[in-house]
Amino acid sequence: MPIDNALMRRLDMRHPVIQAPLAGGGDTPDLIAAVAEAGGLGFIGAAYLTPTQIADAANAVRAKTNRPFGINLFAPLRLPDAVDAAPAVERVAPYFAELGLPPAAAPPLAGLPFDAQFAAAIETGASAFSFTFGIVPPAAIDEVKRRSMFLAGTATTVAEAVALEHAGVDAVVAQGSEAGGHRGTFAGPFEAGMVGTIALVPQIVDAVKVPVIASGGIMDGRGIAAALALGASAVQLGTAFLTCDEAGTPDAYKQAILAAHEDGTRITRAFSGRPARGIVNRFMSEIEASADAILPFPLQNNLTRPLRTAAAKQGRAEFLSLWVGQGVRLAHRQSAAALMARLAKETDVALRRVAM
């Protein structure tokens, strides 16, 4: 049962599957290219990359495929006011020592260089540009439009989706509360943005005229078929790709995903200072017990980065930010091509079953 819609035609997609931007190294050029070659749309999660790294990543993708791919950044964030980092530094000090690291130090009060990142991103040859954590400046939207790039933003409520449409996006990514990783909420309290995918998608579909991309807890063809039935034009999957052979996910991370259950995830600020869903582990539980020692994003993220980097090298999953969605029990270890083929087959079977 072939699927065809305006979004898929615009992005030359054979399957309505988008690999979510996996900022932090999960979305390797091999993974992005494999998804693209299989008929989906792969994304570079460039939020933590320097302009040079953005260019290098895009060149590596282009060397492996001529098909469209996307690039993603965080919207510019207001830096927190000066804060006393001493309690947070003191709280993580024992973990640094346990992993044999130099003593933790107060992170610099510095934001992510959006302007420089954006300038590099639009020169990559990507067909799509997406963003999360807010709305990018009007000048950036105008430049994306001038270059005929497809533009998408993340919403966790109907109000956010409407704001994105008014800003000029070509599609809205509806991020349900089941989604792994950071919450994209920007127009209200994070608690208000905890709306499940199956409830959120049709309400956003009814509220905006642009295509909607469903995200959150979708792991197989049954989830894709359900999202399409709710009115979505495509789906965005993150957790499903983290255990692919081509993913840059550390082995300890992949093993934790394959052993996790749907009730083993939680929203936490422990690793980055911004609410994100991941597998409950030692660091999350112990840091949350002293929540007053958690810095705002991106300071907490900068503070814990050396710890997480060392933990990945040492195979210590108890210190990793194990971002996953609530569909985690459906994860498999396979190649990206095999996953895409399975998703296409499962979606076809699910849609035919519904049509009977």
Image (cartoon, rainbow, N blue to C red):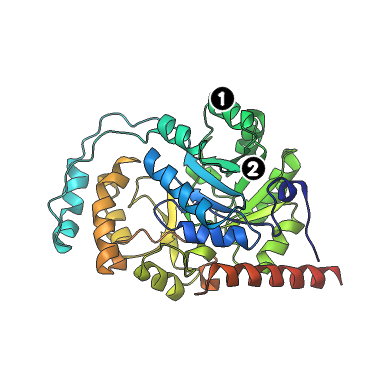
- Residue 104 versus residue 109 in the image, above or below: below
Circle 1 or circle 2, nearest the eye: 1
Q: Report if residue 282 is visible in the image.
A: no
Indicate left or right for 180 with 348 as reference: left
Residue tagged 2 = 172
CB-based contact (under 8 Å), mark 1 and mark 2 = no
- Residue 83 versus residue 156 in the image, above or below: above
Q: Report if residue 97 is visible in the image.
A: yes
Q: Amino acid at mark 1?
A: Pro
Q: Amino acid at mark 2?
A: Val
Residue at position x 23%, y 40% in the image: 107
Q: Provide the secondary structure element on which disc 1 rests.
A: helix
Total count of labels: 2
Indicate left or right for 208 with 21 as reference: right
| Res 259 label | none
Residue tagged 1 = 138
* Front residue of 36 and 346: 36
Quadrant hosting residue 159:
top right
Mark 2 crowd level (few <14, some 14–19, many ≥20, 10 Å Cα): many
Q: Position of residue 72 (x, y in %)?
A: 51, 44
- Check the picture and name the quadrant holding the N terminus: bottom right
Q: Provide the secondary structure element on which disc 2 rests.
A: strand
Q: CA–CA distance between discs 1 and 2? A: 17 Å
Indicate left or right for 47 with 122 as reference: left
Residue at position x 56%, y 40% in the image: 129
Q: Position of residue 67 (x, y in %)?
A: 62, 53
Sequence order check, earlier mark of 1 and 2: 1
Indicate left or right for 37 with 23 as reference: right
Residue at position x 64%, y 72% in the image: 342
- Check the picture and name the quadrant holding the C terminus: bottom right
